[in-house]
């Protein structure tokens, strides 16, 4: 059943993604075409600058739109009138959550790949070649220092990015799910929960920052020295710790949603 859920999730997403993909790649191809006729005129400068601005704006907009699509899809499919049908299917809350989170994460990664492809298309030629050369040079330099650890770091980084994207959706899903506990103004409660979460995180971060200042610079100097003398294992520990924290965050949001969807859901 999860496969069917994922199938319909991806079908709904890609109906909206095809135009976005076409627009981004179309703008990128237009920019590349314009540079075949590069001149020092103001007309070329304004036109090319406008197209580059459109590519940047379109890339940011595509990310925001996918986030909005994901939130809307979760709400309309589970908590609107359509929710009655969804909740009567032989599907557990865990399967619903899993399908929504996986589909949204995969689609966001797909969009990021399209953005990279669009940038590479727009900069194809000497600029793109120089970027690739610089990247390859930095890779060789880093590999010469870190060795095989560099591959592990890249794997850590990829996992962190995937988990961070998934947790971004899980945060909004959790807020929407908690909002369903209200008898009225459910969306309002969801928004309120999000802002309470946001300000709580900011407050805790500020308190931690203030408390650390009492430790003095000697503490940070000593910590920097320890990391410097144990750089490779330190990076492993930091990145693995980040992954563990992301996994714990995912589990917490999942448990909250599953509990409410299974026992406390209040559909109108």
Image (cartoon, rainbow, N blue to C red):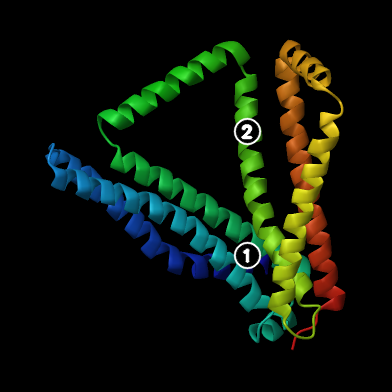
Which residue is at a point 26% across and 28% down the rendered structure image? 126
Q: What label sits on residue 155 in the rendered view?
A: 2
Q: Viewed as shown, does residue 97 lie left or right of 23? A: right
**Quadrant of residue 178 within the rendered picture:** bottom right
Residue 162 placement, left or right of 179: left
**Residue 91 showing in the rendered view:** no
Secondary structure beneath label 1: helix
The vertical placement of 35 against 60, above or below, is: above
Do the residues under discs 1 and 2 have CB atoms within 8 angstroms?
no
At a point 51% along the width and 70% down the height, the residue shown is: 12
In this rendering, the answer to whether 98 lies above or below 124 is: below
- Residue 242 quadrant: top right
Q: Residue 117: image x %, image y %?
A: 38, 44
Question: Image quarter for residue 169?
Answer: bottom right
Q: Residues within 10 Å of mark 2 (few under 14, many from 20)?
A: few
Residue closer to the observer: 199 or 13: 199
* Secondary structure under the numbered disc 2 in the rendered image: helix
The residue pinned by badge 1 equals: 3
Residue drawn at x 23%, y 46% is 48
Q: Mark 1 vs mark 2: which is more N-terminal?
A: 1
Query: Front-most of 158 and 69?
Result: 69
Circle count: 2
* Image coordinates for residue 215, horizontal then vertical, percent: 86, 26
Look at the image and tell me in which quarter the C terminus lies.
bottom right
Gap between marks 1 and 2 measured at Cα: 27 Å
């Amino acid at each position: 059943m999860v496969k069917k859920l994922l199938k319909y999730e991806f079908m709904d997403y890609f109906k909206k993604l095809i135009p976005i993909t076409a627009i981004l790649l179309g703008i990128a191809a237009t920019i590349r075409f314009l540079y075949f006729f590069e001149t020092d005129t103001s007309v070329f400068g304004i036109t090319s600058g406008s197209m580059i601005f459109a590519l940047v704006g379109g890339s940011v907009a595509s990310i925001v739109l996918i986030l909005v699509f994901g939130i809307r899809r979760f709400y309309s499919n589970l908590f609107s009138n359509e929710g009655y049908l969804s909740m009567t299917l032989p599907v557990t809350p865990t399967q619903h959550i899993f399908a929504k989170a996986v589909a949204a994460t995969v689609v966001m990664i797909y969009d990021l790949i399209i953005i990279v492809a669009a940038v590479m298309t727009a900069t194809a030629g000497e600029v793109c070649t120089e970027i690739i050369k610089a990247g390859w040079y930095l890779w060789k330099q880093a590999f010469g220092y870190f060795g095989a650890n560099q591959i592990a770091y890249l794997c850590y980084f990829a996992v962190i990015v995937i988990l961070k994207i998934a947790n971004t959706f899980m945060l909004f899903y959790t807020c929407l799910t908690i909002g369903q506990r209200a008898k009225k103004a459910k969306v309002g409660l969801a928004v309120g929960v999000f802002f309470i979460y946001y300000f709580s995180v900011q407050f805790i971060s500020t308190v931690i920052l203030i408390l650390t200042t009492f430790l003095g610079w000697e503490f940070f100097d000593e910590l920097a020295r320890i990391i410097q003398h144990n750089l490779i294992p330190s990076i492993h520990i930091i990145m693995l710790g980040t992954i563990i924290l992301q996994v714990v965050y995912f589990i917490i949001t999942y448990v909250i949603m599953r509990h409410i969807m299974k026992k406390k859901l209040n559909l109108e």
